[in-house]
Amino acid sequence: MPTSALAAHRPATAFEQARFNMVEQQIRPWDVLDAQVLESLFAVRREDFVPSEWRSLAFADMEIPLDVSGTRSGEVMLAPKVEARLLQAAAIEPGDRVLEIGTGSGYMAALAACHAAAVISYEIKPDLARFARENLSRAGIRSVEVLDGNGLQACSGSGVFDVVILSGSVSFVPKELIERLADGGRLVAIVGELPVMTAQLITRRPG
């Protein structure tokens, strides 16, 4: 990000300072340097997508449990640098149609919506889907549609997408999701089993 653009994000509050530090100390050192991605990280208030009891750690270099409605969901928000790396790999362009599997808190969908034409996001756990809708509505984001259900099964009737984001780790990338990509489309995911997991980018070649 140019120095002039960076100056526009000089922190004025504690949360803004934490956001600034997150970008400078976690995101950039992980080679996430795309200006569009960095602008998204400043534009979307991550602290507003974190369960209230974890809000003070919204910008920490860690996964955050997504326990809502007094129950343990077993799901987490990915660490900020991992979310940023996936977003950079997705290379979302204006006009892109994005499919997300695993809405979680709605934060990744909100980041994607900064530049995509539309985002369709599936969440299999009703409490999390409700939590994400509330977060997105409060943030004033209207281009994200959160749908309840298993995205692997439900998305087959939704046409093709320019970008597919798996917002949780998987042991392998399902063929059904690769088939949802338009020509030139990109799929990003964290693939593998602990302790060996890697970020993967799959691009569908024309023809």
Image (spheres, rainbow, N blue to C red):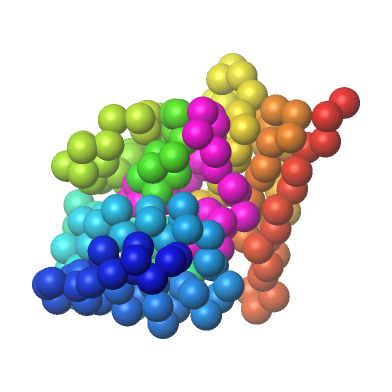
Total marks drawn?
Answer: 0
Q: Quadrant of residue 22?
A: bottom left
Q: Residue furthest left?
A: 13
- Judged left or right of residue 172, residue 59 is left
Q: Position of residue 18 (x, y in %)?
A: 25, 76
Q: Is residue 8 above or below residue 149?
A: below
Q: Give residue 29's position: percent from left, percent from top.
A: 52, 80
In this view, the residue in front, 186 or 17, is 17
Question: Residue drawn 87% across and 26% down?
Answer: 207
Q: Residue at x 27, y 37 (%)?
A: 141
Q: Which residues are magenta?
A: 83-108
Q: Answer above or below: position of 173 versus 35.
A: above
Work out which quarter of the rendered image holds the N terminus and state it. bottom left
Q: Is residue 138 one of those drawn in magenta?
A: no
Residue 19 seen in this snapshot: no
The stretch drawn in magenta includes residue 94: yes
Residue at 62% from the left image edge and 55% from the top image edge: 89
Q: Position of residue 75 (x, y in %)?
A: 42, 59
Name the residue rendered at 60%, 48% in the picture: 90
User: Residue 27, how many percent across, how many down?
Assistant: 46, 72
200 lies left or right of 101: right
Left or right? Give the position of 10 relative to 147: left
The answer to whether 22 is drawn above or below residue 86 in the figure is below
Q: Nearer the viewer, residue 94 or 79?
A: 94
